[in-house]
Image: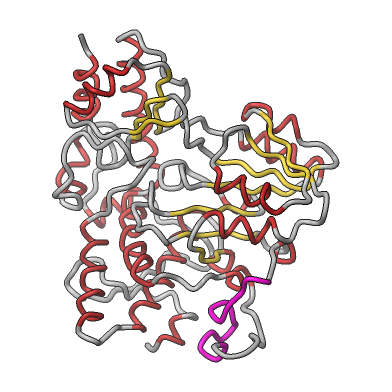
Amino acid sequence: MDAKDAFRTDTYAADTSGSGAVGSNTGGAGTGGARTGGAAAAAGGFDATAPGTDAWGPAVGAEFPSLEPGYLNTATLGVPPRRALHAMRESMDVWEAGRPATDRFEAAVVSARAAFARITGVPVERVALAGTVAQAVGLIAAQLPEGAEVVVAEDDFSSLVQPFAGRGGLSLRIVPLAEVAAAVRPSTALVAVSTAQSADGRVADLPAIRAAAAAHGARVLLDGTQSVGWLPLDAGQYDYVVCHGYKWLLSPHGACFLTVAEGAEPTLSPAFAGWYAGDDPWASCYGPVSQLAPGARQFDARPAYLSFVGAAAALSLVEEIGVAAIHAHDVALAASLREGLSALGHAPVPGDSAIVAVPGMPPTATERLTAAGIRFSARAGNLRFALHLYNTPADVASALAALTG
């Protein structure tokens, strides 16, 4: 298979084992069909029947052999599985030898795109490639008509909000997260909101937002960077979903995705299309692109090959375990941490998020956690913990022990 053919196949040719093996993934890339956690467990040895326990055992542990206990910071940066590192190292080795395997790189891009489509429940032709969230959102912001009203949540992540603020000529309405749905009105052109807030993990009321937008003819843009990978999401119910994979999808920086609903293509600017967005990219390298690709691929940014090599492998792990099983595991651990924090007299932000935020913690808390080897972050006045598939009850116990006394 050459690089040109890789654009039109769903063959999975990225090595995810470090052995150079090539496989085939026929789990419905074109239809959005997702493999189930149960089937994946049977095939890959993952036991996802006991979320929040160590029953995930050696199969998951083998993917993270160097991960030290106490890493509770996926909301900042996910930890790559071993298969992703092997695939990237092998790609770098052939590059160093002057034998860059472009066809294999392109196959990894195809595989990553198809995996993201399955994970988010959309046909693969609905997925565009991006490098950053702000870049993808800019395609939408640039095409909005002058004076269009955009509703965003207060203190939402800047990469989602700034493209609209920086574009100028728009009516940007900033409201509390809990009031986003109620703020939608006939004059609203677009609602843009993160599914889970970076600062405190709160999950948006997506059904209410979707219903309000539908009632008033507004489109909806979701930023799933802090949720896709642990929170089940049907991206097909929204006009656009953008997601950078370096957090909960365990992928390198630079592997970012944008879903575009069928019929919404005219609402994105074509001004930033390059050769890779051509229907035949390798025949579109010079001069104006004669024919943009159909569907969302016409908005592709030229992918960073190594990032997508890693993403293809990392996303295969997410699919093997299944988002439903990951959700149960992550949320159970987060609930245990919230309960323990409350018992110690703290007041974590309530909810069912995998992100646990605690406002008003004393400076000594940071010192104790750091001394105990707990990795976390501080955001908007909160201490923020993020529980993911490689975490165990021992990580929760260690964090609580550090804060006791």
- Up the image or down, 386 lies above or below 351; here it is below
With 333 as the anchor, is 394 left or right in this view?
A: left
Q: x and y percent of residue 199 in the render?
A: 47, 32
| Residue closer to the observer: 352 or 34 | 352
Q: x and y percent of residue 275 in the render?
A: 56, 82
With 44 as the anchor, is 147 left or right in this view?
A: right
| Residue closer to the observer: 230 or 76 | 76
- In the rendered image, residue 277 lying in the magenta stretch gets the answer yes
| Residue closer to the observer: 63 or 167 | 167
Q: x and y percent of residue 326 in the render?
A: 35, 42
With 276 as the anchor, is 45 left or right in this view?
A: left
With 270 as the anchor, is 36 left or right in this view?
A: left
- In the rendered image, residue 241 lying in the magenta stretch gets the answer no
| Residue closer to the observer: 44 or 246 | 246
Bounds of the magenta span?
Answer: 271-284
**In the rendered image, which quarter contains the C terminus?**
top left
- Up the image or down, 57 lies above or below 344; here it is below
Q: x and y percent of residue 37 in the render?
A: 35, 48
* Residue at the spot 64% in from the left edge and 49% down from the top edge: 221
* Residue at the spot 46% in from the left edge and 87% down from the top edge: 4
**In the rendered image, which quarter contains the N terminus?**
bottom left
* Residue at the spot 35% in from the left edge and 34% down from the top edge: 386
